[in-house]
Image (tube, rainbow, N blue to C red):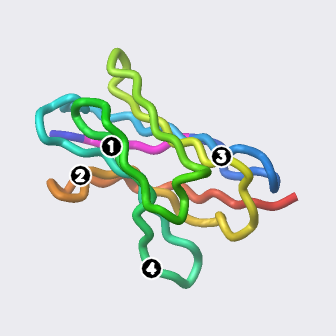
């Protein structure tokens, strides 16, 4: 059974870089045709897809966040990582890692941007 778990700091200061790691167990992030996404939900708003890394390592980003977002992976640890630079309070949200097309979701982690 595939399990997905986010980890990272719950509090980030404005202008700093937010870094979150997703650990996948029970399956490989390099499995053909699997795409692993970061998705967030700000308070009182809907889900926002931020970007993804595919089974071959290609990355994809939503245009509004492209300049501030990177996603990388460590296949030896079966992990992928989100970095979001120059954060502001508007980046406060619950952050999820997921492979939504096949129904694998982490439980989400709250990140608050505040000084």
Residue 105 position (above or below residue 70): below
Q: Return the residue at label 1.
A: 4
By secondary structure, the bulk of the magenta-drawn segment is best described as: strand
Q: Where residue 104 is drawn, which disc sits there?
A: 2
Q: Return the residue at label 4.
A: 46
Residue range highlighted in magenta: 3-7
Residues at marks 1 and 2 touching, judged by CB atoms closer than 8 Å: yes
For the residues marked 3 and 1, what is the alpha-carbon distance in whole angstroms?
19 Å
- Seen as rendered, the residue at the extreme right is 115
The tag earlier along the polypeptide, 3 or 2, is 3
The residue depicted at 61 percent of the width and 41 percent of the height is 19
Q: Return the residue at label 3.
A: 18
The residue depicted at 73 percent of the width and 51 percent of the height is 86
Q: Secondary structure at mark 4?
A: loop
Counting other residues with Cα less than 10 Å from the Cα at mark 4, is it few (<14), some (14-19), or many (20 or more)? few
Residues at marks 4 and 3 touching, judged by CB atoms closer than 8 Å: no
4 is within the stretch colored magenta? yes
The residue depicted at 46 percent of the width and 39 percent of the height is 71
């Amino acid at each position: 059974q595939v399990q997905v778990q986010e980890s990272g700091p719950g509090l980030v200061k404005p202008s700093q870089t937010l870094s979150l790691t997703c650990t996948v167990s029970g399956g490989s992030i390099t499995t053909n045709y699997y795409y692993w996404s970061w998705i967030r939900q700000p308070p009182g708003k809907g889900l926002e897809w931020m970007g993804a890394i595919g089974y071959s390592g290609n990355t994809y980003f939503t245009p509004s966040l492209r300049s501030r977002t990177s996603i990388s992976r460590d296949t030896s640890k079966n992990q992928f990582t989100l970095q979001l630079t120059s954060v502001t309070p508007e980046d406060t949200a619950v952050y999820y890692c997921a492979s939504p097309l096949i129904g694998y979701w982490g439980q989400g982690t709250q990140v608050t941007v505040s000084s």
